[in-house]
Image (cartoon, helix red, strand yellow):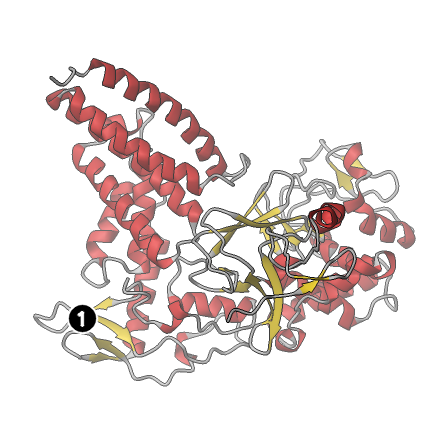
Amino acid sequence: MQMIDKGVCRVCLTQTEHKCSGCQDVHYCTREHQKQDWKQHKHQCVPARVKEDATFGRYLEATREIKAGDIVMKESPLITGPAQVTPPVCLGCYKLLEEGKTVDCVKCGWPCCSEACTLKDEHKPECYYTQQRGDKVSITTFGMPHPNYQCITTLRCLYQRDHDQKLWEKLQALQSHCDERRGTDKWNNDRKMIAEFIWKFFKLDGRFSEEEIMRCCGILQINGHEVPLLEPEYVAVFDRLSMVEHNCRANCNKSFTSDGQIILCAGVNIPAGTHITVCYTDPLWGTEARRHHLADSKFFECSCERCADVTELGISYSAVKCKKKDCKGYLLPQTFIVPILHKTTNPDPATRNLDDKGWVCGTCKDVVTDAIIQQLLQDIGRELSVMPKGDADACERFIGHCSSYLHPSHYYMTDVSLALAQMIGQESEMGLAKVTDDRLQLKTQLCRKIADLLETLAPAETRVRGSLLFELHAAVAETGRRRSMAEGPTALLGYVSESRKILMQSASLLRHEPPELPEGRLLQQAKLNLLQMDELIGTLSMALPSPL
């Protein structure tokens, strides 16, 4: 017998089984009471509820089935501010400032891009403390990192303690990992460049304790999101989105609206009761790099299903070729889930805290020490780092050379293949029309292969996949144009129809990207291309002979 989930109406507290259909988390006894409460509830009405346990702390769980592409939540930031290392930027809108094109705040002297930006609420904290300091700020060097900006976003957090208690409490509820950060190089640098600067420059020694300042530094480090709408990027901290946990094969991705709100979007279908996840690191990195980055910057050691599977869901994304004579197998370690030294900012492979059982060939069972594998990967990494940028021939040479050492889907091979796939056709103003048939075929094969790999390895990474499919649609269309010269309009119609289908997928994956981002501009181009393709398909269809 099915249990009926009852609760109390948000308006009158009457027992009821009726829920809000949007979030499935709030009860109303009547539609009238739901309408009455909507003005307050709409800001919290998302298909996810906050839960908590000993393993994950606070996290979000889907309250109903969420379809791929659905927006899970859209949220405005609690705090925004410049990145810790930044050249002078406008403290109202974060645009890069140029010498001779600034407007100084009449109250504090901090430069902005306009008088309107000097009056924005975002600028109030540093303006307030600068006025209390007694001397205006004078910024005279532009275009390079400026030390005075390192403390701004931390100062903005601290300001809330005495001016917005509710916002301060929300910030303090976020994780800071002070115990794990204490004594690290980053901690010592933040204490010197932020805490001591705030005490001395702003004369706030005694107003804010070291614990308060360093806690705010940690909150920004752990929860801050780089907002890529401008160059340089600025930092934003969000409330509910900070509860979304990490997974290297996440089910959601994040993007931003043009006005700086964050959008959490489902990358796959998410059943009710599932944890909502995003990837805190680059999902195209190898497992060891991802885990070290997370341990170093987020202070936890990932053991998600992808990290726990050395084959990474059958992709062999970190596999190295076995060099034993006549063997065609690949080497992988027993596990990647090994302790990481938290206190080391740049872990030395020689100090890897491994129970080193070596890398084992899946075919011949030969064992190679971890030290030999790490040396090989370091050598290939150095080769990659000095490879000329934007050189398609260099990419092909790298792939040809490293195919003797790495699995075809290894992360180094995928990285260069992705760059090559996007590069082919960009060498000339004529685009793909000037590309050889072999290169066009290579571009098509690479786009298909990497798009399929991403669908398995990182299905929520819609920006890269959407961009790849845009490149693929262009390659398929160009192939059709060339084939039609020999085979006629029927062949062209087939290729254009396939190209349109691929482009529709691309536009769907990129549909939440803002025009400020490259992917958003691709989306706009995709919409134009779809209109042109529909006209072409109509024209070609009309030209074909009618069936008898």
Left/right of residue 58 with respect to residue 266 in the rendered view:
right
Looking at the rendering, which quadrant does residue 379 occupy?
Answer: bottom left
Rendered location of residue 227, percent (x, y): 59, 48
Residue that mark 1 sits on: 322
Q: Is residue 390 visible?
A: no
Q: Residue at x 31, y 77 (%)?
A: 371
Left/right of residue 89 with respect to residue 515 in the rendered view:
right
In the rendered view, would you say 530 is above or below 516? above
In the rendered view, would you say 14 is above or below 299? above
Secondary element type, mark 1 = loop
Dot 1 crowding, Cα within 10 Å, few <14, some 14–19, many 20+: many
- Quarter of the picture holding the C terminus: top left
Rendered location of residue 272, percent (x, y): 50, 61
Rendered location of residue 59, percent (x, y): 59, 66
- Nearest the viewer among 164 and 348 is 164
> Which residue is the extreme one toward the front?
1
Looking at the rendering, which quadrant does residue 498 occupy?
Answer: top left
> Which residue is the extreme one toward the left?
326
Left/right of residue 27 with respect to residue 134 in the rendered view:
left
Q: Which residue is drawn at 37% across and 39% down?
A: 505
Q: Can residue 388 be seen in this view?
A: yes
- Nearest the viewer among 225 and 370 is 225
Left/right of residue 121 with respect to residue 542 in the rendered view:
right
Q: State the count of labels.
A: 1
Q: Of the residues shown, which amino acid type is indicated by label 1?
A: Cys
Rendered location of residue 51, percent (x, y): 61, 68
